[in-house]
Amino acid sequence: MFCSTGSSGLYKAPLSKSLLLVPSSLSLLLALLPHCQRFFLYDLQAVKDDFQIWRLICGRIICLDLKDTFCSSLLIYNFRIFERRYGSRKFASFLLGSWVLSALMDFILVETAWYCFGISASRNLPSGFLAPVFALFVPFYCSIPRVQVAHILGPLSITNKTLIYILGLQLFTSGSYIWIVAISGLISGICYNSKILQVHQVLYIPSWMAKFFSWTLEPIFSSSEPTTEARIGMGATVDIQRQQRVEVLDRQLMLSQFTQARRQRQQQGGMINWNRLFPPLRQRQNVNYRDGQQSEQQASPPLEVSEEQVARLMEMGFSRGDALEALRASNNDLNVATNFLLQH
């Protein structure tokens, strides 16, 4: 939606789709039934004094504030790229682990705020699936490459991640004590993402449970593969519009060739010759069609790939062979190579 790290829609993201539809629908329903909202209040004081353990579940799933529902839904839609990359089971394990860890951190932060600063926040915490959403900012910051979009006010720049951080800041400031939930979510995301104390081996989705939900719920929330591309933005001049159209066509051509080559490799085995698939792009200014054909027929010499960039791609979970070929194909552009590997 905001960052260009995958195709549009909810293709290969059934869990993200369910998190968008079910809690949002229940949140809208509770807005129409205010007398039922008291059962979904996130009240840690009632949990501690009256042993209402069920509030740790009901109070941490459905948002009672529609603004929080809207912001968290937009963030979940953007973070669907992790479900495509890791798979639904690993993505669900991350959400489960951060959800459980953040509940413990909520108790610790509430008690710390009371004993150190005299702040009583145990009855005023916001309800909803907010802590795992904040936890997803950790892998978003660590693994999604930063692509500069525009410069503003000299050294300041807008990237493909700027709007996501702004939306997270909006959610962070939407309530008086939401900062407690946000901090607990970030801490739990760091613990799970960094594999501290081997938390990922304790809090995870078992394979039998993943198969059960894949058989029962995935057909309901699955989405078909998108067949249309995003609409081309309007440029300020005819030349800019033409340049945008040429870039979109080039990207479509490269993606189709990449997909076809991967299918051939799966059927026949072996590595992809990326230098044949992606010849140097034609010069677009003051070059006629014949010169463009001659330049495309010339094979470029093999490029030296930076080992640092290969290591960064391997840290994201890609194999060394795919990382090498992607960097050679993209002329050592880490962002382009990452986008190709994420989309396929």
Image: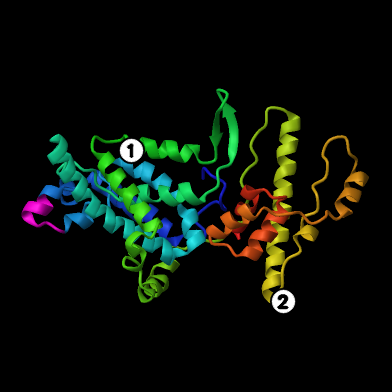
Type of residue at label 2? Answer: Gln
Residue 80: % across, % down: 46, 54
> Which residue sits at x=57%, y=60%?
314
Secondary structure category for the residue under label 2:
helix
Total numbered labels: 2
In the image shown, does 329 or 46 lie closer to the viewer? Answer: 329
Eyeballing the image, is 275 above or below 172?
Answer: below
Q: Are marks 1 and 2 in contact (CB under 8 Å)?
A: no
Horizontal relation, residue 328 to residue 103: left or right? right
Question: Which quarter of the figure has residue 72?
Answer: top left
**254 inside magenta stretch:** no
Residue on which disc 1 sits: 172
Horizontal relation, residue 88 to residue 65: left or right? right
Secondary structure category for the residue under label 1:
helix
Q: What is the residue that sits farthest to the front in this orientation?
A: 307
Identify the disc placed on residue 268: 2
Q: Is residue 194 visible?
A: yes
Residue range (magenta): 46-53
In the image shown, does 159 or 130 lie closer to the viewer? Answer: 159
In the image shown, does 179 or 267 lie closer to the viewer? Answer: 179
Residue 150: % across, % down: 60, 32
> Which residue sits at x=16%, y=35%?
117
Looking at the rendering, in which quadrant would you find the C terminus? bottom right
Crowding at mark 2 (Cα within 10 Å: few <14, some 14-19, many 20+): few
